[in-house]
Amino acid sequence: MASIDARIAALKAELATLEAELPPPVSPLAPAGFPELPVIAGVRFATAAAGVKYAGRVDVMLAELCEGTQMAGVFTRSTTRAAPVLRCEEALAAHTESPDKTGKFAILVNSGNANAFTGGRGFETVDALREAVAKALDCPAEKVFTSSTGVIGEPLDHGRIANTLDGLKATLDPASSASAARAIMTTDTFPKGASATVDLGGVPVRIAGFAKGSGMIAPDMATMLVYIFTDAKISQSVLQKMLWLENASTFNCITVDGDTSTSDTLLLAATGQADMPVIDDFADPRARAFRAALQRLMRDLAQQVARDGEGATKLIEVRVTGANADGPAHRIAMSIANSPLVKTAVAGEDPNWGRVVMAVGKAGERADRDRLTIKFGDILVAENGWVAPSYTEEAGATYMKQSEIVISVDIGLDSGKATVWTCDLTHQYITINADYRS
Amino acid sequence: MASIDARIAALKAELATLEAELPPPVSPLAPAGFPELPVIAGVRFATAAAGVKYAGRVDVMLAELCEGTQMAGVFTRSTTRAAPVLRCEEALAAHTESPDKTGKFAILVNSGNANAFTGGRGFETVDALREAVAKALDCPAEKVFTSSTGVIGEPLDHGRIANTLDGLKATLDPASSASAARAIMTTDTFPKGASATVDLGGVPVRIAGFAKGSGMIAPDMATMLVYIFTDAKISQSVLQKMLWLENASTFNCITVDGDTSTSDTLLLAATGQADMPVIDDFADPRARAFRAALQRLMRDLAQQVARDGEGATKLIEVRVTGANADGPAHRIAMSIANSPLVKTAVAGEDPNWGRVVMAVGKAGERADRDRLTIKFGDILVAENGWVAPSYTEEAGATYMKQSEIVISVDIGLDSGKATVWTCDLTHQYITINADYRS
């Protein structure tokens, strides 16, 4: 036994050494490449390497938005949210109250340090950065939104970031969204972007956005960091309502590990550069068309975050129907999507529907064991309180080998429904989070 | 790169082969050995190998309780609870309504198959087993409690278990509690037992109990499988109230993975064989003495379950004080104890208090970022919304090397408090649950 133990220790040491030489692996669920994002009139991007955490890594992103832009936002409901989030909330409240069109907006984002739980100094840092951006871009400081992502509880050296502003200003470019998407990454293994075009009363309008997020993902009324831009002309109140509604069925429907970030921020900026009459009524038929396009884009980005879940090898879609209302359906779906036993079973390609039953049972919502129907993809697995007569373990095991798994549960009570997305739970999640200080 | 990949694959293959040769590791947090449990007058145990899942493995436990015994119980609140649990609830309700003293009680437990989500056949199986035990032991079928633990969704062959009853009856022995504790194990790496003696008005009374549980542990008003026996003479209503109250601060305060079993069952049997006047009033001072002893024993067993959490290398105690009430304190403590990011940080011996802040923030309870105080053991880590001036990363890192970690969080609002126990989240949890079909 001792000799086996010694050999195992030697093998593990050699493995660790070799694995450290490899570049960080890209999620096997990543899209083929970063999409070509359209230029949005009125938006310019620039990036820089400020050395926030690592020297030489591009870690700052600046977006400048032309005068007349309207801004909407949703933020984490965490009670320990970070200073930049609290300042963004204040800025959005002021803008909502008086959505005037004078002055440019700006968004400044850094990775490497979340400026979260940094006491009063956290606010000083945000305020200094907002002033510096306002001065560099000649815009009002109250129209500067900042986000920070990375390690919690360490002071953010705002001087390093402020020092990059002149260079950032000089390189602002409408076509730099791809490098902007890269600049905000932390443990992400790929940058996440999506775009859409939509016809609004004969006028073609563009939407483009990007996101970061991989761990600490269980958004609550907001998500990760996501920035979406459009040239549509939409009033602030309509824009905000659209964002809030579409967030509920997209970013609020993903989870990687059930942990909610202190920094979740989602901003949607409408520059109004498209040659169209303003949409200032939510009942305007063009609003419905825009919402549909926005939802597709947001769902795409949300799924990309789940695809880049730390250690993910499978994308899991959980569809719950037949609950007594939509809210309970969402909570049952999240109970399944957050269950470590369901997620490890999927990682092990084990069609372990008993764990799905368990996760429904623990959700605390109305459910009747004997009315549940469970499917893996199109395969009927269980019904009437037991395994379906037609189900075979072989069919289930074959299905679980796919990289995208759909688990459908009908509760059999009423018409409440919800769909959420998550990923499996693997050794790589442990490796990332037992080693990485985030 | 290709050669590194090939070498890594070869190393992993050799590792897997070697590790398969090793016996299943015992949790490093296991007690030195199974404690010497006192004989409880009126209780006899027997065990057998029925071949429920594996041939030759001891997987059935029978406990016979003398006439005059009073029984109390608490069960899972899962909405998908198993047939044996539902029948136990019925049996307990009947006994509570009419706690007569004629006829023996019996407890029959099998491991290897949970008889959960097995439709109408699940009830037929339980009823057949209860009838068989009643016949073998000459006791009323309605006084037979059964529990089943193991795989969900597969039919339980009750004939195999019934066939062992004659042998079980013939070997009933008051001193066989250690083998009884082993018979109910599934993924447990060690059997869990505890005992206490308490003086009740000059009469020495004994309590002994054992438990199983390692994964799917987030009890909700009950827990795992736990059987506790005492020779005290206590009325059913007082016994039930004691069990319910002590459960709230013991088994309901542990979590391994946030997943709640369909089979959680906790039974407390009082044989009344001690030569003492009955305790039939909760205000009796002897009731307080008994409760205190019962609580120590239940807390000991609960902590043993956390110590045997799947893959555990560290026991984590989370103490929350200063919340606006005890309920919120418990939910904040559970939010920390269930956070995969906190648990992987502990596994990696990383004093990552930022993740503790995150977990407080996502709990959905009242909290003020700037009033939080966080300690690791006796080390003050953070206060006033930021890292404490006296804190050093070295002190934190040294503390995290211990095998038992205490995380204390004061919310700074009021006097609500709670303490819960959990374990870290390691590679071994993934290995166990991506491979084992439970």
Image (spheres, coloured by chain):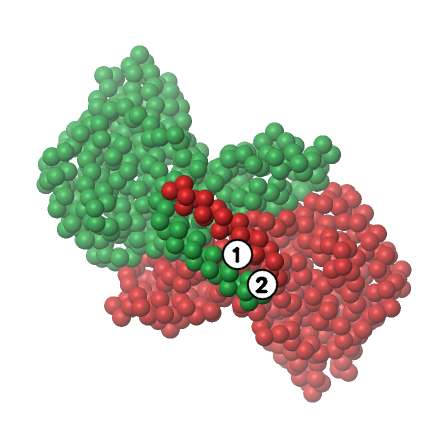
Chain colours: A red, B green
Point 76% across, 76% down: residue: A175
Image-based side of A271 in relation to B102, left or right: right
Callout 2: chain: A
Residue labelled with disc 1 = A428
State the SS at label 1.
Answer: helix
Nearer-the-camera pick, A343 or A106: A343
Mark 2 Cα within 10 Å, few/some/many (few <14, many 20+)?
few
**Does residue B410 show up?**
no
Nearer-the-camera pick, A171 or B82: A171
Nearer-the-camera pick, A30 or B370: A30
Point 54% across, 68% down: residue: A29
Image disc number at residue A25: 2
Nearer-the-camera pick, B225 or B274: B225
Instruction: Name which residue type carries label 2.
Output: Pro
Where does the image place residue B29, in percent across and percent down from the top left? 44, 36
Q: Are marks 1 and 2 in contact (CB under 8 Å)?
A: yes
Q: Residue furthest front?
A: A3
Rendered image quadrant of residue A57: bottom right
Q: Determine whether A145 is above or below A116 in the image.
A: below
State the SS at label 2.
Answer: loop
Rendered image quadrant of residue B221: top left
Point 46% across, 57% down: residue: B12
**Does residue A346 show up?**
yes
Instruction: Name which residue type carries label 1.
Output: Gln
Where does the image place residue B142, in percent across and percent down from the top left? 18, 41
